[in-house]
Amino acid sequence: MIQLENISKIYDLQEVKITALDNVSFNIDRGEYIAIMGPSGSGKSTMMQILGILDNATNGVYKLEGYDITTLPDKEQARIRNKHFGFIFQSFNLFPELSAVENVMLPMQYAGVPVKKRKERAIYLLNEVGLDHRMNHLPTMLSGGEQQRVAIARALSNEPDLILADEPTGNLPTEKGDEIMDILEKVNNNGVTIVMVTHNPNQGKRAKRIINLRDGRLESSITATGAAYAK
Ligand SMILES: Nc1ncnc2c1ncn2[C@@H]1O[C@H](COP(=O)(O)OP(=O)(O)O)[C@@H](O)[C@H]1O
Ligand SMILES: [Mg+2]
């Protein structure tokens, strides 16, 4: 689905240049569930930004379905992002003035889905993540774990090919985090590709492949069966 070829990201600050990613290459196949791990500052979030086309690499090529998207104009990149990707963040990032169902409906509004369909699908997705009794709650009336479930439903709203989740359980107690992992596993079993950043080795093990970053370099890429990933 995705090929990254020699991706580098250099943040050019006034005094110094920071190499956040240094010549990283790997592929993501459809249906994969990848955990990106590595110490703080190793480039995990930068990698997620680039994968989600929220930022562009300084060097290297990003191919989506064989198509080089690296140098597309911002507008075209945004269109691809909205059509193909769903995002889940550590801090949930829900709109505080919108109810659970309205938060899930919003990306579908941007995608031009008619309002009746938006509502139907939002209700369906909130049911899927176990929030049938919380449809009209505002985020402040929900626990952290519940807010993250809303965020998962929202990420799924436009039927993405790929979900990108940067430390999705980072703000949750272990038990609630495990529930989020159960939901992500179900989403992957339904055919959605997932790339997730985690610090938690037990969560990393639940992915089908672990990519380790260190100092912006790809240190290893190991499948759940222990095999080094060839590509
Ligand atoms: N917007 C930015 N401007 C400058 N430096 C940044 C920026 N974002 C990240 N960095 C730097 O790039 C490196 C990698 O950061 P990051 O990708 O956030 O790592 P991780 O998510 O693994 O903790 C760090 O040294 C960080 O300080
Ligand atoms: Mg990070």
Image: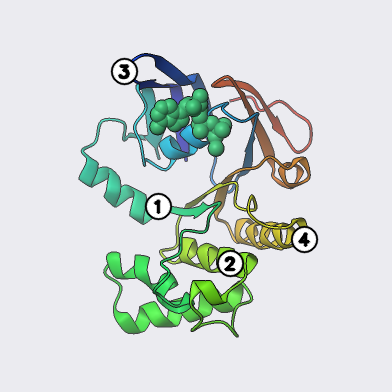
Q: Judge by depth and name the residue closer to the eye, 203 or 76.
A: 203
Inter-mark Cα distance, 2 to 4: 14 Å
- Which mark sits nearer the N-terminus, 1 or 4? 1
Q: Secondary structure at mark 2?
A: helix
Q: Which residue is mark 1?
A: 84
Label drawn at residue 68: none
Q: Which residue is mark 2?
A: 149
Residue at the (47%, 65%) spot, across then down:
154
Which image quadrant is residue 17 in? top left
**Label 3 amino acid?**
Gln
Task: Mark 2 and mark 4 in contact? Answer it, CB < 8 Å.
Answer: no
Inter-mark Cα distance, 1 to 2: 20 Å
- Which mark sits nearer the N-terminus, 2 or 4? 2
Single out the residue that lies furthest toward the front. 15
Q: Judge by depth and name the residue closer to the eye, 151 or 220.
A: 151
- Which mark sits nearer the N-terminus, 3 or 2? 3
Q: Secondary structure at mark 4?
A: helix
Q: Secondary structure at mark 3?
A: loop
**Label 2 amino acid?**
Arg
On screen, 179 above or below 171? below
**Label 1 amino acid?**
His
Label drawn at residue 14: 3
